[in-house]
Amino acid sequence: MSVPRAADRGSYANRRTSEPVRRRAVRAALLLLFVIIATLSSHRYWEFAEAAARRAQDNNFYKNLAIMGGLVFAFVTAGGRFSIDRLLARK
């Protein structure tokens, strides 16, 4: 009994998108929305005059920007309609 080669199994882009992949993208989008709202409401570093408080809020603001970047990456690579795999499969 032989193991099928990767080329025989088909690529990820050719497979139908499964439900867990869609849920993953929705979760990433909802978390992204939450982090955007939390960042803009809680870490307004430009309103602080004291240097230490401003620096602390500045660090948290940019930390949340990095989290947003990771969530965008998770959304784009999760599969589905707006995935990179689907865009590459079109070409």
Image (cartoon, rainbow, N blue to C red):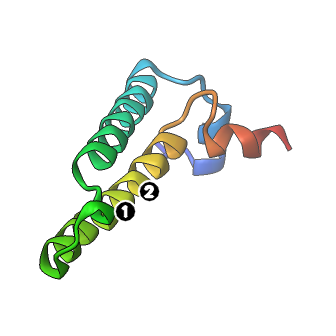
Vertical relation: 35 (above or below) 50: above
Q: Residue at x 33, y 56 (%)?
A: 67
The spot of residue 8 in percent (x, y) is: 64, 42
Which disc is residue 69 wearing? 2
Contact check, label 2 and label 1, Cβ < 8 Å:
yes
Q: Which residue is drawn at 44% across and 56% down?
A: 69
Vertical relation: 51 (above or below) 40: below
Foreground pick, 81 / 69: 69
Q: Residue at x 38, y 59 (%)?
A: 65
The spot of residue 23 in percent (x, y) is: 38, 24
Which disc is residue 66 wearing? 1
The spot of residue 9 in percent (x, y) is: 59, 39
Q: Quadrant of residue 55?
A: bottom left
Question: From where the camera sits, is residue 31 visible?
Answer: yes
Cα distance in 3D space between marks 2 and 1: 5 Å
Question: From where the camera sits, is residue 10 visible?
Answer: no
Tell me the kind of residue under disc 1.
Ala
